[in-house]
Image: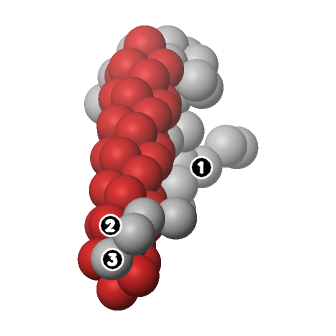
Amino acid sequence: MAFDIYGQPLRRGHCEVHPDVWGEYPCALCITEQQEHECAREHDRARMEEYERQLEEDRISSLQGMHGDGI
């Protein structure tokens, strides 16, 4: 007998992760959640790249200000 991730008996033809959803793992809900997580990771990555770019620009501006004549 198969069990869902909560330790309950798994009904035939249902997802192990989403036991109320008909369809074997990965069900449509699993796939949708995975796509949402990937989108969020991509968004986070883009925000981190922008943050790092801004830090580098600020660092360069600060150094130019210290030297007075630019780098």
Task: Check residue 3 in the rendering and tell me which mark sits there, or answer none.
Answer: 1
Residue closest to the far front: 69
Under circle 2, the secondary element is: helix
Residue at image position (54%, 39%) is 16
- The residue under label 2 is 61
Label 3 vs label 2, nearer the camera: 3
Residue 70, image x, y percentages: 42, 65
Q: Nearer the viewer, residue 55 or 13?
A: 55
Residue 19, image x, y percentages: 40, 36
Label 1 vs label 3, nearer the camera: 3
- The residue under label 3 is 68
Q: Are marks 1 and 3 in contact (CB under 8 Å)?
A: no
The residue type indicated by label 1 comes to Phe
Under circle 1, the secondary element is: loop
Residue 48 seen: no
Residue at image position (53%, 48%) is 4
Residue at image position (44%, 23%) is 35
The residue type indicated by label 2 comes to Ser
Q: Nearer the viewer, residue 14 or 43?
A: 43
